[in-house]
Amino acid sequence: MRYLLNVIYGLLILLGLPWLVWAAVRKGKYRHGFAAKFLGRYPNVPPKTGRRIWIHAVSVGEVNLAAVLLKELNRRWKGYDYVITSTSRTGYELARKKFAEHAVFYAPLDFSWSVARAFRAFQPDLLVLMELEIWPNLLAEAGRRGVPSVIVNGRLGEKSFRNYRRVLPLISRVMKNLSLVLVQDTTCGERFAALGVPPEKIVPTGSLKYDGARLDRNNEKTLLLKKLWGIADSDWVFLAGSTQEPEESLAVETFRTLAEEFPSLRLILVPRHPERFAEVAEMLDRQGLAWTRRTQLAENRETPERILLVDTVGELGAWWGTARIGFVGGSMGNRGGQNMIEPAGYGVAVCFGPNTWNFRDIVRTLLDADAARVVQNGSEMTAFVRHCLENPAFADQLGKKAQNLVVSQQGATAKTVDGMERLW
């Protein structure tokens, strides 16, 4: 089976080669980590100092969740060391910042030789996969080496479930290599079971995303950012975070419509992907509005601009703490939404678009608690922001409901580590 998979992966890469080359040249993607990804070469792995846990977090969101998990693991499992891998460049760079005391590498692609060499280099005693990283050769190699593998914060949406069902004979063989699946809710657990995971290996724990949410706006990082941009307590910051095209334009149009009427309104744009920073900057220039970049901010510098483009990676969580009104991106297009829990934890009055299937359960929980709003288009976004500005009590109440909901859902991290201890 692994050799057949190698052939399939190779054919897929060949078919997608023109697009891959274009993305590498135009956007800078896929240039980094070639030796690790394709060849499984890891020349600088530190020697083991005890039991070693390999945590794989595919991109930025999973890296942030891994930080929540790792904090609890360090508290309860003394003397262990950790290797963290990520697939995307942004995830890798964020992991290097967050886990400076641990070994961080690009993850191997699911070629049999790459994952075999990675296992030889890392020598893990446990493989932890964040959310939904189901790779046949990786899991099979773990099984051959007797390394337990666990999915943490397991999430299996309806669309992914339907796709996996189409290849059920293959996926059921893969799923049987898993030692434990710690899922966000019973619905996800039922879907994993339908794909071949034995029910006794499935444990609902809740979502780590709630545990990772900050609640205190007066944390050190948020206060520093607030000072850097000169945000006053009387300012109304509208933050559009994790955005994709055309969401930045919609947020700018909302600001343009309301800026003169509400002089305390300020706008922060945080695109989801760093390669779009230049594109968004060009759009702002065309709009003819005064704006500045996060990388140009400096302490004690006057900041008359009312629009800020955050052109850094890993700061969105802290910037949410400066906002009173928020739009969570990836929800007007085809991405399926982004994490709404971060702004909810700070008590931001949150809205998002209609396309949030990747966070369907979280969205349903927020809407059932009357703790967020759905906006269908730019006009509704503008109407929502206007309503918040005209009715501060409404905005504060909406944000408070969201924050209370996050608090009520916390506790998944402890349950997750309790589950993982079964493997020892």
Image (tube, helix red, strand yellow):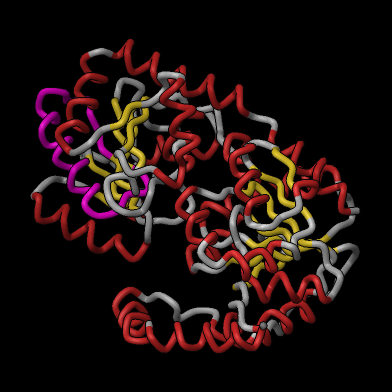
How many numbered marks, from 0 up? Answer: 0
Q: Residue at x 91, y 53 (%)?
A: 424
- In front of the other: 76 or 363: 363
Q: Residue at x 13, y 55 (%)?
A: 285
**Image check: 329 left or right of 131?**
left
**Image check: 424 left or right of 151?**
right
Q: Quadrant of residue 30?
A: bottom left
**Image check: 324 left or right of 110?**
left
Estimate the x, y position of residue 122 in percent, counting from the top left: 77, 74
Q: Is residue 359 magenta?
A: no
Q: Is residue 262 magenta?
A: yes
- Look at the image and give the residue range highlighted in magenta: 241-267
- In front of the other: 283 or 143: 143
Q: Residue at x 60, y 44 (%)?
A: 188
- In front of the other: 196 or 208: 196
Up-down: is 335 above or below 122? above
Residue, far top: 393
